[in-house]
């Protein structure tokens, strides 16, 4: 068994989004956490769980 297979891929901390790191509205930095993907500059919620 490979140890990395047993670790979760979601974290509670904010991390840059892997899908897109730029807001389509303002061009600001986008971060993703367990609950939502949000723009740090204009606070646009891009995706929610």
Image: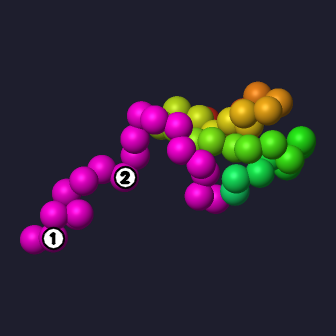
Residue at x 10% of width, y 71% of height:
1
Residue labelled with disc 2: 9
Report whether residue 47 is seen. no
| Range of residues picked out in magenta | 1-19
Residue labelled with disc 1: 2
Give the alpha-carbon distance from disc 1 to disc 2, as whole Å.
15 Å
Name the foreground residue: 8 vs 22: 22
| Mark nearer the N terminus (1 vs 2) | 1
Quadrant assignment for the C terminus: top right
Please provide percent x and percent y for residue 24.
Answer: 85, 49
Magenta stretch contains residue 8: yes
Magenta stretch contains residue 27: no
Please provide percent x and percent y for residue 10.
Answer: 40, 46
* Residue projecting furthest to the left: 1
Please provide percent x and percent y for residue 28.
Answer: 81, 43
Q: Quadrant of residue 41?
A: top right
Q: Is residue 12 left or right of residue 30?
A: left
Mark 2 crowd level (few <14, some 14–19, many ≥20, 10 Å Cα):
few
Evaluate if marks 1 and 2 touch, with contact meaning CB atoms under 8 Å apart. no
């Amino acid at each position: 068994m490979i140890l990395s297979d047993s670790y979760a891929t979601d974290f509670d901390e904010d991390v840059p989004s892997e899908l897109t790191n730029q807001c389509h509205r303002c061009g600001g930095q986008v971060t993703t956490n367990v609950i939502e993907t949000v723009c740090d500059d204009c606070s646009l919620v891009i995706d929610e769980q």
